[in-house]
Amino acid sequence: MATRTEDGVARGGPLARVLVYGLLLFAAAYFLLPLYVMLTTSFKTLGQISGGNLFALPAPFSLTGWRDAWSSACTGSDCTGLQHYFWNSVAFTVPAVLLSTAFGALNGYVLTKWRFRGSEIVFGLLLVGTFVPFQMFLLPMARVLGMIGLDNSVAGLTLVHTVYGVAFTTLFCRNYYVAIPDELVKAARIDGASFISTFRYVILPISTPILMVCVIWQFTQIWNDFLFGVVFTSGDAHPITVALNNLVNTSSTGVKRYNVDMAGAIITALPTLVVYIVAGRYFMRGLTAGAVKG
Amino acid sequence: MAVLNIENVSKTFGETRVLEDINIAMAEGEFLILVGPSGCGKSTLLNMIAGLETITEGQITLDGRSVNAASPRERNIAMVFQFYALYPNMNVRRNIEFGLKMRGVAKKERGATVDRVARMLQIEDLLDRKPAQLSGGQRQRVAIGRALARDPALFLFDEPLSNLDAKLRVEMRTEIKQLHQRLATAMVYVTHDQIEAMTLGDRIAVMHAGRVQQLGTPREIYDDPANRYVAGFIGSPAMNFIECELSGRAGDITVCLSGSEGESRLWLPAATTEKLAAHGARRVVMGVRPEHLVPAVAERAGAIACRIDVVEPTGPDTYLHTEINAEPVTARCLPSAAPVAGDTVALAVDVERAVFFDCDSEARIA
Ligand SMILES: Nc1ncnc2c1ncn2[C@@H]1O[C@H](COP(=O)(O)OP(=O)(O)O)[C@@H](O)[C@H]1O
Ligand SMILES: [Mg+2]
C-alpha cells in the first residue's frame, strides 16, 4: 500500500522496497561481476585458473600475469608485451584529444560569437560529420594519409582522430557557448580585446566544464578505437587496442594464459578509467550547464 | 564641435530595414536619450556608434573623425550593457581594469585607476568579489565602473537600469545623473522608459519604427510633440486623444465635445485656429493631457458634464476615467476634491494647451 512521505513522494511498503533493492543489487552485480572475475583472474597463477573456481580469490597472489602482459607476452611475432603499444596509444591519444578539443572550442567560439555569412551552413556540415559512420572514413582517409606520407604512423593516427573528433567537440562547445550572453563578447570588444584575447581571457576561463566533456569524450573514443588503428597502422605502430587483440589471439604454447589476457585488458582499460575519475565530476556538470543561463 | 555626429544613417539586416535616415548631432557634455518601444532600433543605433554593428548607409563621426571603418577599440567610447556583461571569471578589480590591461596600461597605473573609480562608486569593499557574489545593483555599479575606468570621450548606456527593481532603479537613475554632472562627459542613454528619458536627458530622441520621430529637450517633447506617436508615448498617464469635428472658419473655430451627460462647444485660441484653418480639415484629433482636463472650478461655460466610471487615486493626484466623444479619457483632480465613481462631474479643457493632429497622417497640425 502506498503511503505519503515527507517529501510528498508515494513509496511502497517494505515488500516493494525489498524488491526494488533486490533489483538494484542484481543490476550492480551484473555489471561488477565480470570486473571482479577479470581482476581476480589477473592475479591468479595459471595452475589455479585451470583447476579452480572462477569466483575464488587468487591463492597464491601472483603478479606474473601483469608482468608478462606489460613486458614479455607475445603479440604476434613480437614478444615484448603491451608496453610499447601502450606508449604508442599515449603518443597519438594525448595530442589528438588536446588538438580536437582546442579546435572544437575555437570553432564553437567562432560559430556563436563571431558569426559570419554562411556560418550556420558550416555548422550544419560539421554536424553531418557526427553522423558519418567510422567505416565511411576508412578508404578516403587511407588515400589521404598515403598522399601526405603519414600512413602507418602515430602522426597519421593523430591526424585522423583529430579530424574525426572535431565534429563532436565543435558540437559540444557550440551548444555551450550559445548559452553565454553575446554581451560578454561585446563588452570585451569595447574594452579593446582582440578576437584571440577575448577567447583567452573571457571565454576560455568559463569553459572548464565543456572542455572536460570534450576531453573525456575524445579520450574514450580515441583510446578505445580499434578500427582506425588496425586499418591505418601495422606492426610497430599499432595502438594498444590492436596489440591487446593480438596478444589474446597469440598463444605460443597453445595454452590460453587467462591471467595475462585479463591483466592486458585491464591495462588497456585503465587510462580511460583514470580520466573518468579525474575529470568525471565535471562531466555531468558540463552536459547540463548549457541548459542554465550563465 | 560635435562630440558625436550621426548623418543620414540607415541600417539593414539582410532584407529588413531597421533604421532609416537617422540624423543626430551631440554637443560636448550632453546627455542624449534614445527612447522608444522595444524593437525600434535603439540598441542597433547604439551598437553602430560603438562599432559593434556595421553602418549600412550614412556616416558617424566621433570628435570630427569618421569612424565608419573603425573597430570599437579605435573609438574612444565606453559602454554599459543591460545585462551587466561582467566577466564572470574575474573579480571586480580585474573586471574594472580589463579595458586598461587590453590597452597596455601599466599595472601600477591600473591599480590607481581602479581605486579612484571604486571610491567614486563606493564599491571599494567589493573589489575582491566575483560578479556572482554581487546583487543586481552592485553588478550595475561595477559595470559603470568598468566604463569609467577608461575615461572615454563618450559613454554609451543600453537600458542599464531595466533589470533592477523599481526602487533601486530610481536611486541609480539619480546617481547616473549626478555622475554625468560630475564628469561632464557626453552620454548616449538608451531606454524604453519615458520617465527615465524625461528625468535624465538634456535632449531626447523619440524613436519609432526605425526613425527619429522627434529630437528635442524634454520640455519641447512634452509640450510640443511633433506627432501623435510622440504625444502618446511621452507622459504618464498618456495624453487623451479625442476625435472631433471643427466648425466655423478662420479666427472663429469651435470644437464640439460631448460627455455622457451633456455636450459643449469650445472656442479655440487664435494661434490654434489659424493653423487649423490653414490645414483645412474638418475632422481632427485633439490631444489633451490629463492635467489639462480637470474638474471645472465653477459653473463655467465650456465645461463638459461627464459621468465618472473609475476613480484612481495615486497619492499626489487622483485620476478620473470617463468618455468624451465616445473615447475613453483620463482627467486629473486633487485627491481632496475627488468624486466617487458614478458621480457626474463638469470637466474643463485647457484649450491653450490642447494640440491637434491629422486623423490619417497623425502629424501635428496645431
Ligand atoms: N543581428 C540582427 N539580425 C537581424 N535582425 C536584427 C538583428 N539585431 C536586431 N535586429 C532587429 O532589428 C530591430 C531593432 O532591434 P534593436 O535595435 O535591438 O531594438 P531595441 O533595442 O530598440 O529594442 C528588431 O526588429 C530586431 O529584430
Ligand atoms: Mg535594446
Image (tube, helix red, strand yellow):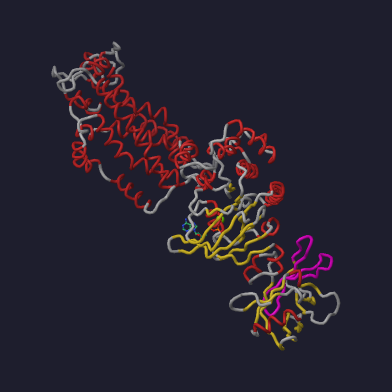
Residue B359 against residue B175 in the figure, above or below: below
* B22, above or below A195, in the image: below
Whether residue A37 is visible here, answered yes or no, is no
Q: Quadrant of residue B196?
A: bottom right
In the rendered image, residue B239 lying in the magenta stretch gets the answer: no
- Give the residue drawn at x 69%, y 49%: B184
Toward the bottom, the furthest residue is B248
Q: What x and y, as percent, mark residue B54?
A: 48, 55
In the image, residue B327 lies in the stretch drawn in magenta: yes
Q: Position of residue A46 (x, y in %)?
A: 22, 15
**Left or right, residue A200 beside residue B305:** left
Res B302 → quadrant: bottom right
Q: Which residues are magenta?
A: B312-341
Return the x and y of residue A196 as percentages of the image width and height: 44, 39
Closest to the observer, B144 or B76: B76
Q: Is residue B74 above or below residue B16?
A: above
Q: Is residue B331 visible?
A: yes
Instruction: Judge by depth and name the residue closer to the eye, B21 or B74.
Output: B74
**Residue beneath the point at 30% across and 12% down:** A61
**Image quadrant where residue B26 sits:** bottom right
Percent coordinates x, y for residue A171 in the rendering: 37, 44
- Left or right: residue B152 versus residue A206 is right
